[in-house]
Amino acid sequence: MASTAEHDAMRRALAIAANGPRGVNPQVGAVLLSPTGEVLAEGWHRGAGTPHAEVDALSRLAPGGARGATAVVTLEPCNHTGRTGPCSEALIAAGVSRVVYAVSDPGDHSSGGAARLRAAGVDVEAGLLQGEATALLDSWLTVQRLGRPHVTVKWAQSLDGRAAAADGTSQWITGPAAREDVHRRRAEADAILVGTGTLLADDPALTARRPDGSLHDHQPRPVVVGRRPVPADAAVLRHPLPLITDDGRDLPGLLRDLGRQGVQRVFVEGGPTLASAFLRDGLADEVLVYVAPVLLGGDRLALRDIGVATIGQARRLAVASVIPLGDDVLYVAVPRQAQEPDAEAPAPQEGDD
């Protein structure tokens, strides 16, 4: 069982892991503890081609300084040789006697580090603060497990479940605090998707902006999904990054294409048809619902057909958090279990979002 010192070290490893860049490689942190629980060294992965977190931490000690130490790592030490050598071998060579990690490596080529360590006589414990580490690594883990980017589906709705008023107007259902939160989350994404219906109705810029209107340093790639053309004067065409268009017939294929372009985190902004298509096809890894205390009535529902005909087919979600944002409330939820895509489900049609 992990000690108090190991719990503290894992929290520190998670904190320093976030210093590394989010990209093709995971953000990983490592802390080395003496046999009596004192911190000897720490390290994190600084990007492709640089030493992994464990090796970065080991490099800060004199030769032999890690003998008998415990390595606390956010991700199972790798067991493959790429641009750097396997971390499992580096830990064995350094004389580490115990390894505690949070999340198992799901990679076909990089996994197996724990087994290699145990075979060398190293004591290994897995799963310490697994939930926190999974949240940090969620996009990378999705890419490794499913071969596509991590997908967040977001929408804003009235208390009675409407995404727009009867005349189609939808700006703004939510207040400033909720909109600021949306833009912060946009800045954390690699791509932002919107349907042509929402593009034509709202003319969104699809940028990530601060409250003063300035752009965040990181901008998501804008993607418009649907069969109607983008107007020549659309605000999205002034986005600092090139626009990607897709007809929406093959959403899994679109995600794979985005993944091949280095996109790991996709933010689906809407509208109702596009959001429903991602949910219906089991492509949503996270759902963000911003609920405003207003009533709109009418038939402009926030969701359309998601493939649920009876209550037994309901898409069950686990609520991860409920966040007050001014007068509004954000529900953050994840699917309780992965949904298999429905190959026969129709793509968004002309005239839809």
Image (cartoon, rainbow, N blue to C red):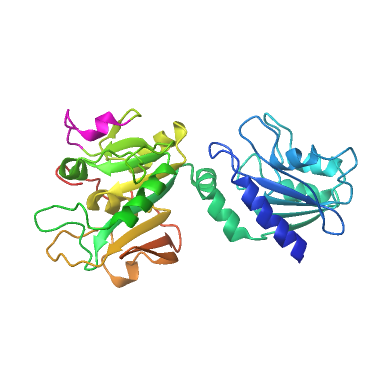
Q: Main secondary structure of the magenta part?
A: loop
Q: Give the residues drawn in magenta, as a range.
A: 227-239
Image: 240 above or below 152: above
Residue 257 percent across, percent down from the top left: 40, 34
| Residue projecting furthest to the bottom | 311
Q: Is residue 283 visible?
A: no
Kindly identify the residue that appears in the image at 37 percent across and 37 percent down: 215
Kindly identify the residue that appears in the image at 26 percent across and 66 percent down: 309
Kindly identify the residue that appears in the image at 27 percent across and 57 percent down: 175
Q: How many marks?
A: 0
233 lies left or right of 81: left
Image quarter of residue 338 = bottom left
Image quarter of residue 316 = bottom left
Q: Is residue 232 magenta?
A: yes
Q: Is residue 237 magenta?
A: yes
Residue 234 percent across, percent down from the top left: 20, 33
Q: Quadrant of the N terminus?
A: bottom right
| Residue projecting furthest to the left | 167
Residue 300 vs residue 172, the one in the foreground: 172
Q: Is residue 346 visible?
A: yes
Residue 3 vs residue 313, the one in the foreground: 3
Kindly identify the residue that appears in the image at 65 percent across and 29 percent down: 49
Residue 133 percent across, percent down from the top left: 60, 54
Residue 345 percent across, percent down from the top left: 28, 50
